[in-house]
Image (spheres, helix red, strand yellow):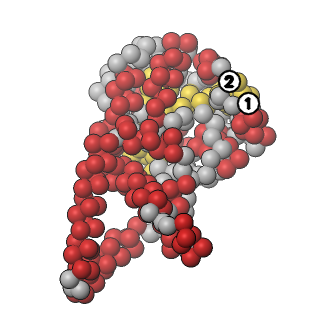
Amino acid sequence: MARHQSLDSQLQNTLAIVGVGLIGGSVGLAARRTGQFRRILGVGRDEESLSRARRFRCVDETSTRLEFAASADIVVVCTPVDRIAEQVLELAPRCRPGTLIIDAGSTKAFIVETIEAALPDHVDFVGAHPLAGSEKRGPENGRADLFDSRVTVLTPTQETGADALERASSFWSSLGSQVRVMSPENHDRALGFTSHLPHLVAAALAGALPDALRELTASGFRDTTRIAAGDPALWTAIFEQNSPAILDALENFENQLAALRTALASRDTTTLTQLLADAKRIRDALGNRDSSM
């Protein structure tokens, strides 16, 4: 059941972004490109980073106070996953009726369940995850085209109003995204395979490199371990929140690795070639997308 009737488009005057880093900065730049907001506000903990966000025109005005975002029509929370639910629930009571709050976290089930259990009736929340990003950080690395033709997953539940889902979908579509809808649980299972496991594997590969061999690494090793350069604290929180799905994905990966090990140890070149050919076929089908996570 919808919480609210559709808001008149002229009310969409202010966008607030909580956490103006790479993703938040890109949301601001992409939203500015659309021209649909008169003001874009930024909230963060670090004054120097907020100054860079203003300088690169990701946002118009900034504050270190969370309540600064309460005047917005749409609020996008782009902070690490272990802070999102707390921030949404702190901000929501201060927002005016009809405010739409969206998050951009890489995990969904815990965040959505926690927020919906205590969300005030006068605001709406829709979980979201734009499948775009980089190992780089900060608003200076934001891009207006970061979401172009990239999937953004929305994760509504039975508590999500139809109007809120439509507004969230329209917002991400306006930024260039291709919107897909999944349950929070299905999202987490899928991203455990497609995003979280790759980071874990890249981290393991980078961590296994002996110091003496660093000067011998070339593009293959560097490309394969690129995402291991991501923020360790951010990824620890993701791994903690989605550990069951990641462990399932890790078991599947270990089985694949075991098959490769067995073929290699037994010098079974037929099986080894087939495994490599299967992997190439799957990778070729993905196409090329730069800077995705």
Examine the rendering and report whether any part of residue 143 can be seen.
Answer: yes
Q: Does residue 240 appear to the left or right of 10 in the view shown? A: left
Provide the residue designation for mark 1: 47
Locate residue 78, reporting x and y percent. Answer: 54, 36
Q: Which one is earlier in the sequence, the residue at label 2 or at label 1?
A: 1
As drawn, is 141 to the left or to the right of 168? Answer: right
Mark 1 secondary-structure assignment: helix
Label at residue 64: 2
Q: Residue at left 51%, top 17%?
A: 90
> Observer-nearest residue: 24 or 197?
197
Circle 2/circle 1 CB separation < 8 Å: yes
Q: Residue at x 47, y 50 (%)?
A: 131
The three-letter code of the residue at mark 1 reads Glu
- Does 151 sit left or right of 58 as displayed? left
Residue at the outermost front position: 212
Q: Secondary structure at mark 2?
A: loop
Rendered image quadrant of residue 42:
top right
User: In the image, residue 189 lies at what x, y percent?
Assistant: 29, 46
The CA span between labels 2 and 1 is: 7 Å
Quadrant of residue 28 within the rendered picture: top right
